[in-house]
Image (spheres, coloured by chain):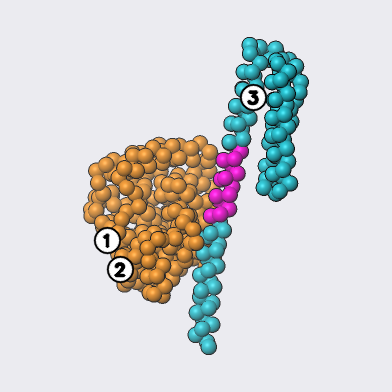
Amino acid sequence: MKTLVIIPCYNEEENLDRVIARLQKEYPAADYLVVNDCSTDSSEEVLRRGKYNYISLPVNLGIGGGVQSGYLYAVEKGYDITVQMDGDGQHNPKYLPAVIEPVANGQLDMCIGSRFIHKEGFQSSGARRFGIGFLSGLIRLLTGTKVLDVTSGFRACNKELTAFYAHNYAQDYPEPEAIVSGTLNGFKIGEAPVVMEERMGGQSSISPIKGAYYMVKVSIALVVHRLILRKKKGAK
Amino acid sequence: MLPELRIILLLGAIAYLLVILALLKKGKLNVQYSLIWLASAVVLIIFAAFPYTVYVLRDLLNIEVPANLVFLLLFIFVLALLLSLSTIVTGFASRIRKLTQTQALLEKRLRELEETLNKKE
């Protein structure tokens, strides 16, 4: 199975080399694509020097538009499975097989790497866990899909869902919204346990102050999504 | 209504229409987006030239002060206009996104093409 690992990157000059080296060592079977979302640091320089496989967006689109470019690339090149993996080193490629397996054997259309199933490794702060728990409950209420780690950006999609996301991908709060839009369009979404690490270096893109505001906005966005999208049962 | 006020209102409404037409002529306003503006200018001119129409509308809707009817209509107009602007901006945003993504993918292909050409030489 042709597998592509999409690595969204915004100002990750410190982590890129390590992240890519680790990926090639742990999971050499997969191709990868770094999506440089108009970084303001020397990420592009690092990518060029390392002769890595990357695309560079001329304007900053945010995580949603960045990841979607990766999906477009996957469709263009005909990949069977696309995996999204953060560029900050939180996601260990050692767990790629665990995330890919349920998709490869047809059990799921999308499998999300979840740190909350076995509750091992980096668990994030209490406030964030509470927020994620709330969103998880909301998504379950809205769609019936049970996903614990709804904001996890470690996720594998099959070919059909990749094609769907290449043309309809939520832009503002992509991780939770993609679960809702995927489910409502008849795709099966589940989780696999993984262990996450704290980011290697650099700054996270979400500051703690923005957290509460983020929660309110995501919740409203999810409810709106549910209202505008009709549930397609069993349709693909 | 005082005749002076009526004249001022009429002149103001005509000036508004002329500004819109000037923008259209200079190509600073799309014909597509100008229709709603032109319509609003025409309505304002009618109201200023024939205040009687406002009185008739007021009686029909049972509003006490004619000015309130004008304000209500203006408010509805502005609200509709803002909403339509939001939809236009949304359309632009998604087009820009699509262009950005396509450009990035093309840039990658070009970069690779140049590399293979350089190797051959």
Question: Which class describes the residues within 10 Å of circle 1: few (<14), some (14-19), or many (20+)?
Answer: some
Q: Which residue is mark 2?
A: A18
Give the SS element for disc 3: helix
Highlighted range, magenta: B83-97
- Chain ID, cyan in image: B
Front disc: 1 or 3: 3
Depth check: A155 or A8 in front?
A: A8
Give the SS element for disc 2: helix
Q: Chain of mark 1?
A: A
Q: Colour of chain A?
A: orange
In 3D space, how far apart are the residues under numbered discs 2 and 3 (Cα atoms)?
A: 62 Å
Does residue A227 appear in the picture of this structure? yes
Q: Which residue is mark 1?
A: A200
Give the SS element for disc 1: loop
| Callout 1 amino acid | Met
The spot of residue B32 in percent (x, y) is 70, 44
In 3D space, how far apart are the residues under numbered discs 1 and 2 (Cα atoms)?
A: 9 Å
Is residue A64 highlighted in magenta? Answer: no
| Callout 2 amino acid | Arg
Is residue B92 highlighted in magenta? Answer: yes
Q: Which residue is mark 3?
A: B73
| Callout 3 amino acid | Leu
Q: Is residue A25 above or below residue B64?
A: below
Does residue A109 appear in the picture of this structure? no
